[in-house]
Image (cartoon, rainbow, N blue to C red):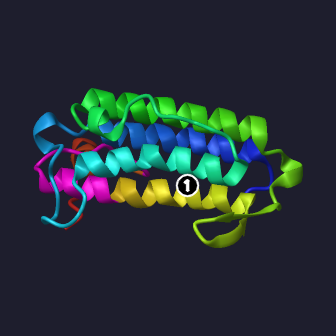
């Protein structure tokens, strides 16, 4: 949990950079990569991360935020997905900084049918990013693409460092 909004914003900045790196790995051909016909594809998962900003902000701090592109527009290119994510992430951070002070991190709000503190919302937002970023890395590998090292080296980076095989 976070004791200050400054702690959250430092964590958020790092996590947003990592998520951006993963989204940038999507190729136009892989945008539609999905585990099956009923689950979201790579592009839809990436856009969902941006949607979360508007949902969280509107419900947690009653601020109005719109995304740079609609879902239909953003899903037309990787560049637009990256742009809508980066723009949304920056607006999210600005809204948190402007509207949630350390003194009200313990305030309880109702979001998605749950009564939770603003501090918990911030924590869940980070975990939500990590969860979907993990899904995207699996789908990227499934599409035959390299993924960036996130919390350590990826397979290719590991091999390039001459480290022993992890099999």
- Residue 34 lies, in percent from the top left, at 17, 58
Residues shaded magenta: 135-151
Residue 153 in view in this figure:
no
Q: Residue at x 22, y 40 (%)?
A: 26
Decide if residue 108 is on the left or right side of residue 148. Answer: right
Decide if residue 103 is on the left or right side of residue 160. Answer: right
Decide if residue 156 is on the left or right side of residue 133. Answer: left
Q: Residue at x 12, y 51 (%)?
A: 143
Q: Quadrant of residue 12?
A: top right
Figure quadrant of the N terminus:
bottom right
Magenta span includes 139 = yes
Q: Which residue is mark 1?
A: 126
- Residue 142 lies, in percent from the top left, at 14, 57
Disc 1 secondary structure class: helix
- Residue 120 lies, in percent from the top left, at 68, 63
Q: Nearer the viewer, residue 65 or 18?
A: 65
- Residue 63 lies, in percent from the top left, at 68, 41
Q: Residue at x 65, y 41 (%)?
A: 10
Q: Is residue 113 above or below residue 48?
A: below
Q: Residue at x 37, y 53 (%)?
A: 133
Crowding at label 1, few (<14), some or many (≥20) Cα neighbours within 10 Å? some
Q: Quadrant of residue 6?
A: top right
């Amino acid at each position: 949990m976070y004791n200050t909004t400054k702690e959250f914003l430092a964590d958020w900045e790092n996590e947003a950079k990592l998520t951006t790196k993963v989204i940038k790995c999507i190729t136009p051909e892989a945008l539609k990569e999905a585990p099956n016909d009923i689950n979201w594809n790579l592009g839809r998962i990436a856009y969902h991360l941006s949607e979360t900003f508007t949902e969280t902000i509107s419900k947690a701090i009653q601020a109005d935020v719109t995304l740079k592109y609609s879902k239909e527009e953003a899903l037309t290119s990787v560049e637009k997905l990256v742009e809508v994510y980066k723009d949304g992430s920056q607006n999210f951070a600005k809204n948190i900084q402007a509207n949630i002070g350390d003194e009200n991190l313990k305030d309880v709000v109702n979001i998605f049918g749950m009564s939770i503190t603003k501090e918990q919302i911030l924590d869940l937002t980070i975990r939500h990013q990590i969860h979907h970023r993990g899904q995207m890395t699996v789908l990227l590998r499934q599409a035959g693409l390299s993924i960036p090292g996130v919390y350590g080296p990826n397979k290719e980076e590991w091999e390039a460092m001459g480290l022993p095989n992890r099999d």
